Image (tube, rainbow, N blue to C red):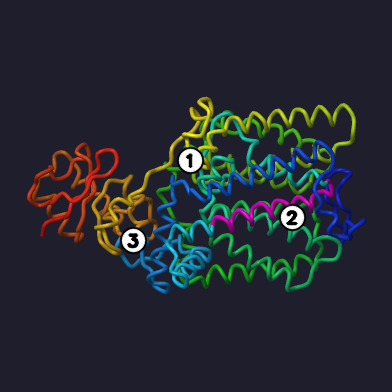
Amino acid sequence: MSVTTGNTGGTRGPGRRLTGPGGPLAAVRTPRGAAGTALWAAVTLFVVLMLLVIVRLPWAGDLGMHAATVERLRHRLLDPGNPLVDENTPSPYYSPWTVFLGVLARLTGLSVWAVLRIGALFGLTLLVTGVWRYVRELTDRRSAPPLALLCLVLLWGSQVFNWSGFIGLNSLALTVAYPSALALGLAFHFWALLTRALKGEPAGWGVFLGLGALWAVILLCHQFTGVVATLGALGTLAGARAGRRAWLRLGTGILLGVLVLALWPYYDFFALFGAGGLEAIHRPLYQHLLTRFGLVLLGVAALGVRARRDPRDPLVVFFLLGVAVFAAGGLTGHYSWGRALPAVLVPAQLAAAVEVAGATRGALRNAGAALLAAALTFGAWAQAGVLGYAVGRHALPAPVAAKYRPPWTGYHWITPWVRYGDVVMAPVFPARQVPAYGAYTVAPGYPDFFLPDEAKRNAAVRTYFAAGSTRSAQLEVLRSYQVRWVVQRPSDGGLKPGDPGLRRVASGPAGQVLYAVVR
């Protein structure tokens, strides 16, 4: 079997192991010289920044969902039920990773927030080491891994874009505790292991079985990142030109992965193929592409260079597959397919780093390095507001503070009264946070494919808060769902302040009030 990689002159050949003074570990040494020192310093600053962010754990987006998931698993590991509402339904959020965190919380007695910080630290470690390891399989240039890490977090655009599975610096700061961050770290390790397994003579059966199991774990932890991992694996296979023996072993690994997916007890993975109702949520993925991702065009140019050298280059094929899925989603109105966009961004960002690191010395190399340095600097400035998640807004200079967007404040203020398992009536925004503290809400704050009465629950919440609803209809909703508490502002609607059906208990931020339901 022949193997070609289509990389720069610094790329390893088939079966070649980098050696030199100090043995094989010399291959992972950091780059030398002023440029190398600057790269290493930048990566160190990135890691320190992320560690400070993990300590503060800013809350935005889906963090409450993941906290609620761990909380349910802590209390009922084998049969946790729905993480958001008081129903015994499965949930795709019960992944191998959240089950592990639930076990950790159960055994240690640590709070869910402490456990999520531990998970974030583990996910960050996997991401950094995974990038490093994968890039080392693409090239032997010592400056490539740190440069690739910087490209992945900074080479984006002028407009900050936050979404799980997207690792722009600001987005990563808000999602580092999510399963998507861990899944992407595993994906980089998966690509690295697959690349090495296909070099020269294919690896043994056990390696490919392990790769199949790892592929299944990634898909179970975060389904969209699992799609990205699969597209990257297809790119690797195209570049490797695998022979018959490799395909047989790979097929066995795939069968094991499918078996793991089929046997996962917490939810039916294959039922997700019929999930609907996600298109409107994902439509923004197709908007403002140039301002959000314009700097990635440098990586697209680098991919063009690689494509001329080898049309089956793994990064090129990875990129083209990502473009195909993303474009198909936009053209057909399946906007949830836009979650494959990292399969477009990641190979381009990696290509920019690998090409600049591997360019021969001279004017072209200097020009490419200068252009990439300028783009990274611009990208860093565009996301400078992320510093506030590490040190707080008060410590930021005014120009940086203007870019900072404060995280959510949370609902810790209700915990002296609201107990685990209590049902709370709340509008959509509080419903995305309240379950993190152990309570349930009447309707889930997020779409739930496995909840059969989701539409009925959403209608009940609308009835309670609607201006035209009668008092009797509102009280019937509270009785039907055994609601014990209500979180609302005067502008939300609902029963009026002073109504005998409610008793004011506590006040929260932005005029919110916690009421006990009088039975």
Q: Which is nearer the N-term, disc 3 or disc 1? A: 1
**What residue appears at the point 63 percent right and 65 percent down from the top-left corner?**
214
Q: Which is nearer the N-term, disc 2 or disc 3? A: 2
Q: CA distance from mark 2 to mark 3?
A: 39 Å
Please say if 259 is above or below 479: below
- Label 1 crowding class (10 Å Cα cut-off): few <14, some 14-19, many 20+? few
Please say if 291 is above or below 478: above
Residue 223 in sight: no
Disc number placed over residue 143 in the picture, else none: none
Q: CA distance from mark 3 to mark 1?
A: 37 Å
Q: Amino acid at mark 2?
A: Arg
Q: Which residues are magenta?
A: 120-141
Query: What residue would you read off at disc 1?
Result: 333
Pair 3/1: label in front: 3
Query: What residue would you read off at disc 3?
Result: 438
**What residue appears at the point 53 percent right and 38 percent down from the top-left corner?**
330
Query: Are discs 3 and 1 less than 8 Å apart at CB?
Result: no
Q: Is residue 123 magenta?
A: yes
**What residue appears at the point 78 percent right and 44 percent down from the top-left corner?**
144
Q: Is residue 319 left or right of residue 475?
A: right
Q: Is residue 1 left or right of residue 210?
A: right
Q: In front here: 217 or 244?
A: 217
Q: In front here: 263 or 119?
A: 119
Pair 2/3: label in front: 3
The percent position of residue 107, horizontal first and vertical second, equals: 47, 73
Query: What residue would you read off at disc 2?
Result: 133
Query: Quadrant of the image for the N terminus?
Result: bottom right
